[in-house]
Image (cartoon, rainbow, N blue to C red):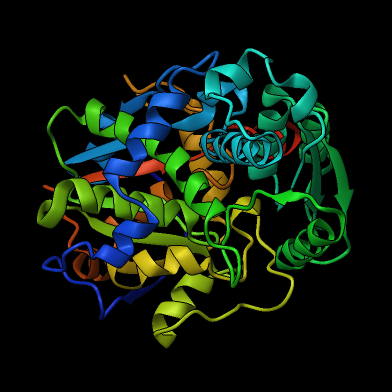
Amino acid sequence: MLKLSGSLTHFSNPLASAEHVYSAEQRSVLNVEHAQTAIRDITRWPGYAPTPLHDLSTTAKTAKLGKLWYKDESLRFGLKSFKALGGAYAVAKQLQLVLQARHGEMPTMDDLLAGKWQKEAADVVVSCATDGNHGRSVSWGAQMFGCQCIIYVHRDVSEGRKQAMESFGAQVIRITGNYDESVRTADTEAKKHGRVIVSDTSYEGYMEIPKDVALGYTVMLSEIVEQLDGEIPTHVFVQGGVGGLASAVCGYFWDIWGEARPRFVVVEPEEANCLQQSAQAGKPVAVLGDLETLMAGLACGEVSSLAWTILSNGADDFMTISEEAIPQAMRILAKGREAEPAIEAGESAVPGYAAAIIANHSPEYANKLGLDSTSRVLVLGTEGATDPELYRELVG
């Protein structure tokens, strides 16, 4: 018996429909054709390797699902997070544009990797706000491509995550406010000092760079399509946050699979459910307060504008999950089950996995989500132990 307890809330999106066509406006945010450049570039970076897609057949059987696939990002580039793909790719793209503007010539990705623009790149400063993994990607990308990096973190970011960014040469500045306040601080300071903001969330006046971040994520999604080898999931459960990853997953699969696309379920913490509340309101709304949650990477109160362009009618369901389910799910994955491998999953990696299992054990939620013993469910394990001390505390 698979013991995983926790509470869920659910909102079915009245604007979503399997008959909807992926619109031109949505394709302008992310599409499969534009993703090919990012996929070509990133798969040539040093150390690139596809991450595993685990077929959790034992868990699927005990959870009464037909299939359960887990995309394991704990091995991504040694950064242990899918965000290694997005932030670093956007750093490279911005560095190319800045150097072209300053010197009249755009360096290639290979030129940057080879250090041929080392002197010129060293004069460029990239910056962002983060709750951990995105900032690690940006700082790693800055180190890889040779520019400077300044990162802003909010009061709840662990010292371990702060030190991880500093290990890549970034200057990390902690503010006293929450994540959304750190975003505003980073933006204000960048305008004052001529830095390039590389953010994974979009807002008024800042729309283009987050598109490159999302395109970086498509490397993971193209791997999934290849690893599924022709199978298409009936459901995808993915974590929320500001919506950047969720919209990339939804948009990419919608564009490539069309009407055959899976039912798309966004999962958020109870105290930071800006996407669910926005769906209920029919427009983006902010969740105020401390946004206290164990799921540090999802402690976001404001929706990314670009993400909402896709999710407003692309996400079928918005769910929240209670805090107690998270350590349980982490421990189950860490232990492994029969033929399944032991998987290192961080606290922000497991909400989709946990929600799918808990929901299918509840007749109410299984019915609302269309889950049954024939369902083929894909979940995205977006990070490993990005805070090793916290991971040891929760998993043992």
Give the left or right position of residue 162, taking residue 100 as reference: right
Image location (x, y in percent) of residue 225: 24, 34
Give the left or right position of residue 65, taking residue 380 as reference: left
Name the image quarter holding the N terminus: top left
Position above or below: 69 against 152: above
Name the image quarter holding the C terminus: top right
Image location (x, y in percent) of residue 42: 47, 26
Of residue 330 and residue 130, the one placed in the foreground of this image is 130
Of residue 118 and residue 89, the one placed in the foreground of this image is 118
Image location (x, y in percent) of residue 277: 48, 79
Task: Please tell me which residue is depicted at 81% across the width and 63% down the height of the picture.
Answer: 185
Residue farthest toward the bottom in the current orientation of the protein: 281
Position above or below: 66 against 180: above
Image location (x, y in percent) of residue 201: 58, 59
Give the left or right position of residue 261, taking residue 211 as reference: left
Task: Please tell me which residue is depicted at 61% across the width and 77% down the height of the picture.
Answer: 287
Tally of numbered discs: 0
Give the left or right position of residue 176, taking residue 135 as reference: right
Residue 270, can we see it?
Answer: yes
Task: Please tell me which residue is depicted at 68% across the width and 79% down the height of the picture.
Answer: 288
Residue 7, can we see it?
Answer: no
Task: Please tell me which residue is depicted at 52% across the width and 56% down the height of the picture.
Answer: 208
Of residue 228 and residue 27, the one placed in the foreground of this image is 27
Residue farthest toward the front in the current orientation of the protein: 104
Position above or below: 162 against 41: below
